[in-house]
Image (tube, helix red, strand yellow):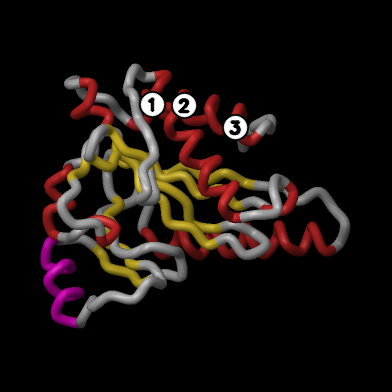
Amino acid sequence: MRYLPAWELQKRIAARVMANVKEGKEARHTLLLLEHYPVFTTGIRKSDYTPEVEAQLKSTGADFHRTNRGGLITFHGPGQLIAYPILHLSSFSPGIKWYVCALERTVIRTLRGLGIHAHTSPHTGVWVGENKICALGLQGRHVTTHGLGLNCNTDLQWFTHIVPCGIPDKGVTSVTQELRRETTISQVEPHFLKAFAEVFKCQLVFS
């Protein structure tokens, strides 16, 4: 799915969730799972993404979009499980810090189910050793948007065009690279859904 249609979909769902809450109805929290065409996105933290840099990144064949999420630049593309939880945050917890930690725990449980030992670090996201396997970028005022990208069988060469999340001297990895066998999104997704339901203490209804 292209990035902009996915963003428009998130905004429509978030508006519906907020309207439901204001009207005293069931919030109808939503978890979107999808896969993007190649795209570089930046967050609200300031950095020098000049028109020249933007043109250079677009020359790789990827799209480029500036967003209102937290964090710096990252890549999304084929082979990466994208999760956009659209939640009325105070229904789960009063704070964004809890939410970030909950998403990180969800990914760590997901990877544990696949036989990968992952951890957090002072940097946001989920790591295997010194390599990031999952990036987080969130917007969490009242209703959450944006989310995470978990590298399953992503072509990691895309990340050589940027400093992922603005963290120099760190690498990136994927489920496929860690397990040393091709592992697709469809193989990872059931583990992610199970972990999400456990961490957020919710029942998932598919539609």
Q: Are marks 1 and 2 in contact (CB under 8 Å)?
A: yes
x, y percent for residue 189:
44, 29
Q: Does residue 35 appear anywhere in the picture?
A: no
Secondary structure beneath disc 1?
A: helix
Report the Cα–Cα distance between label 3 and label 1. Answer: 14 Å
The residue furthest bottom is 51
Classed neighbour count for the residue bearing mark 1: other residues with Cα under 10 Å, few (<14), some (14–19), many (≥20): many
Q: CA distance from mark 1 to mark 2?
A: 5 Å
Q: Range of the magenta residues?
A: 51-60
Q: Tag count in the figure?
A: 3
Residue furthest out toward the front? 122
Give the amino acid type for the residue marked by disc 3 in the picture: Val
Q: Closer to the N terminus: mark 3 or mark 2?
A: 2
Q: Give the residue pinned by disc 3.
A: 199
Q: Nearer the viewer, residue 6 or 109?
A: 109
Q: Are marks 3 and 2 in contact (CB under 8 Å)?
A: yes
Relative horizontal placement of residue 92, taking residue 73 as reference (left or right): right
Report the residue marked by disc 2. 109
| Structural crowding at the residue carrying mark 2, measured as other residues with C-alpha within 10 Å and reported as few (<14), some (14–19) or many (≥20) | many
Residue at 40 percent of width and 21 percent of height? 112
The amino acid type, in three-letter code, at marker 2 is Arg
Secondary structure under tag 3 reads helix
